[in-house]
């Protein structure tokens, strides 16, 4: 198998497992094209009409309901820059959450906090808005 990004584990001598998030976060990562589904688009600039201003207390995340919960849940594993560069569909946020819990060992918060965080991400980091 050939991969365009980093290999994170090998299940046997011939089969490697590709980690799409590691491909985006490694130093020197190269994004191939705008057609690549993993291409990260930058968050809307706060100067755009209706975009919340960044909150420096929460790593520059958009200052909106759920920013604090998102900051503390997510920065346990990665920086806010990873969050701010994402422009995923709402459905992809759900899939990514499941992947982080199932495959990356993210501790899942209580159900109410999970809803607050996913709603925040979908409202402020979605490619659908």
Image (cartoon, helix red, strand yellow):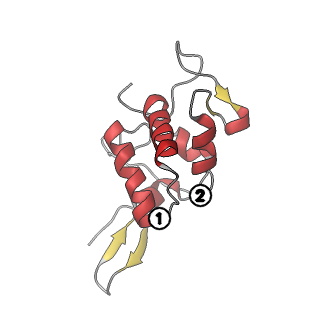
14 on left or right of 75: left
Instruction: Kindly state the secondary structure of the residue where label 1 is placed.
Output: helix
Residue 90 seen in render: yes
Q: Nearer the viewer, residue 70 or 113?
A: 113
Instruction: Please give the name of the residue rendered at 62% of the width and 43% of the height, measured from the top-left corner.
Output: 71
Q: Nearer the viewer, residue 7 or 64?
A: 64
Residue 120, position in %: x, y? 50, 34
Q: Which residue is the extreme one toward the right?
A: 57
The answer to which of marks 1 and 2 sits earlier in the sequence is 2
Tag shown at residue 15: none
Query: Which of the image's four quarters has the N terminus?
Result: bottom left
Q: Relative to 45, is 26 above or below?
A: below
Q: Nearer the viewer, residue 111 or 76?
A: 111
Instruction: Kindly state the secondary structure of the residue where label 2 is placed.
Output: loop
Q: Relative to 85, is 99 above or below?
A: below
Query: Which of the image's four quarters has the C terminus?
Result: top left
Instruction: Please give the name of the residue rendered at 28% of the width and 83% of the height, measured from the top-left corner.
Output: 14
Q: Relative to 71, is 122 above or below?
A: above
Instruction: Please give the name of the residue rendered at 63% of the width and 47% of the height, measured from the top-left corner.
Output: 72
Residue 86, position in %: x, y? 47, 40
Q: Which residue is mark 1?
A: 104
Q: Which residue is the extreme one toward the bottom?
A: 13
Q: Which residue is mark 2?
A: 77
Residue 60, position in %: x, y? 66, 34
Residue 67, position in %: x, y? 60, 35
Q: Are marks 1 and 2 in contact (CB under 8 Å)?
A: yes
Count the marks: 2
Instruction: Please give the name of the residue rendered at 33% of the width and 75% of the height, measured from the top-left corner.
Output: 16
Q: Badge 1: how crowded within 10 Å, few (<14), some, or many (20+)?
A: few
């Amino acid at each position: 198998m050939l991969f365009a990004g980093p290999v994170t584990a090998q299940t046997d001598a011939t089969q490697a497992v590709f980690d799409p998030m590691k491909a985006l976060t490694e130093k020197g990562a190269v994004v191939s094209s705008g057609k690549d589904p993993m291409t990260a688009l930058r968050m809307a600039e706060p100067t755009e009409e209706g975009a919340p201003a960044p909150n420096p207390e929460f790593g520059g995340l958009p200052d909106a309901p759920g920013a604090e919960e998102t900051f503390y849940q997510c920065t346990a594993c990665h920086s806010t820059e990873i969050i701010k560069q994402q422009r995923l569909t709402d459905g992809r946020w759900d899939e990514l959450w499941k992947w982080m819990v199932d495959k990356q060992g993210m501790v899942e918060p209580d159900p109410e906090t999970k809803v607050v965080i996913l709603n925040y991400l979908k409202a402020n980091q979605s490619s659908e808005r």
